[in-house]
Amino acid sequence: MYERNADLVFTEKAPAISGSALLFIAMASGLAVANIYFAQPLLDTMGRTFGIAQANIGMIITITQIFYALGLFFLVPLGDLLNQRRLAVGMLSISALALLTVGIAPSVIVVMIGMAFIGLFAVVAQVLVAYTASLAAPEDRGRAVGLVTSGIVIGILLARTIAGLLTDLAGWRSVYYFSAVLTMLMAAAIYRKLPRQAATQRSMAYPQLLRSVWQLFVQEPLLRVRAVLALFIFTVFSILWTSLVLPLSAPPLSLSHSSIGSFGLAGVAGALAAVRAGKLADRGLGQRTTGIALILLLLAWVPLSFTEQSLWALIIGVIALDFAVQAVHVTNQSMILSLRPESRSRLTAGYMIFYSIGSAIGSISSTVAYAHAGWRGVSLLGASVSAAGLLFWAVTRHIGFSKRK
């Protein structure tokens, strides 16, 4: 089956992607995006190192997310034009240099520059998501994308555990030295192990490629709705994980970095449980899955609000919240990647820009909320954004529904 426009020829096949190749792509994607999140459990330590006020420390995460959004728009669409494997290798190599820069940074300015480049090239994970959608058979695409997306979320969550352990052992800079080496090894492995891309494209001018991202937003209402849902859920995700280190590291809890990072393991359980969301989307149950998950996202803030009184309540809340976010995210991507096979990288870019904006908003707003109203303020903020996301879905749930349920 051939899908054509004036600039592209895309061959939609149903190639057999092996389970081992899919697992490797998921692992590679998780490792790539983890680079953005290593700093979250280290914010208090990095703040003390460079003399950054508590209310402003969230800027380290925010600057990374801003440049991640820029990378989504300017770099990810190249996956519809260039060899995706070579593109991924180049982006990972630059990421390794940026990680090394943060590790040796003598000042907060150098840290910010390094974090900006880490964010810019961490979008390689989204190049790999679109690559997976091209390799998978149409009837199995939701499951395949769900597995890779779960790898990304697990990478985000394990980043906190790894960062906490390494910081307690050898200081926060060791986290970035370790990741720089690991990222270079991953670049070499991707070049050697991954199959060649399945799409064959004609040449398209780069400015035209970028303009087409906005055109997709105009032409595809389902993309617009699902992108806004991504903004809501990842604002909530970032509200929790950016600010969580603050009450856990403060008295009376005063937990170590490794202990704080270990709560990411609870989130992994939720992310793994949500892999099935992709299968439900393949069966046309995406809207129902979205609604149930958004209700759970709101309810998760009930136990989370008791974090300072009970770590068990925190664990329950983390599992519920990460399950809900992952279920909506997998469903979103399964829906939008089925719209136009020849534009999957650009569809991914447009969608993920809203993810990045939400993450940046959540990072800065949560630290400000904590500085002014403590954990109660963070919980109220998270619940309010969750409720707004649920309301938005309820109002827009029929938009684009005829294309994909």
Image (cartoon, rainbow, N blue to C red):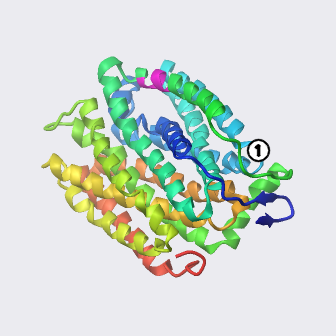
Residue 239: image location, x then y, percent: 37, 52
Residue 111 in the image: above or below residue 320: above
Instruction: Tell me where residue 275 appears, x and y as whole percent.
Output: 42, 56
Label 1 element class = loop
Please say whether residue 317 is one of the residues in the magenta stretch. no
Tell me the quadrant of the picture where the N terminus can be found: bottom right
Q: Nearer the viewer, residue 133 or 400?
A: 133
Residue segment shown in magenta:
175-179
Residue appearing at x 35%, y 56% in the figure: 273
Residue 43 place in picture, x, y as percent: 37, 34
Question: Where is 257 relative to 128, above or below?
Answer: above
Q: In this view, does 220 lie above or below 195?
A: below
Residue 88 relative to residue 292: left or right: right
Q: Is the magenta stretch mostly helix, strand or loop?
A: helix
- For the question of whether residue 333 can be seen, the reply is no
Between 340 and 363, the one nearer to me in the picture? 340
Question: For mark 1, what is the residue?
Answer: 82
Question: Which residue: 34% across, 38% down?
Answer: 54
Please state which amino acid type lies under the numbered disc 1. Leu
x and y, in percent, of residue 403 in the image: 60, 77
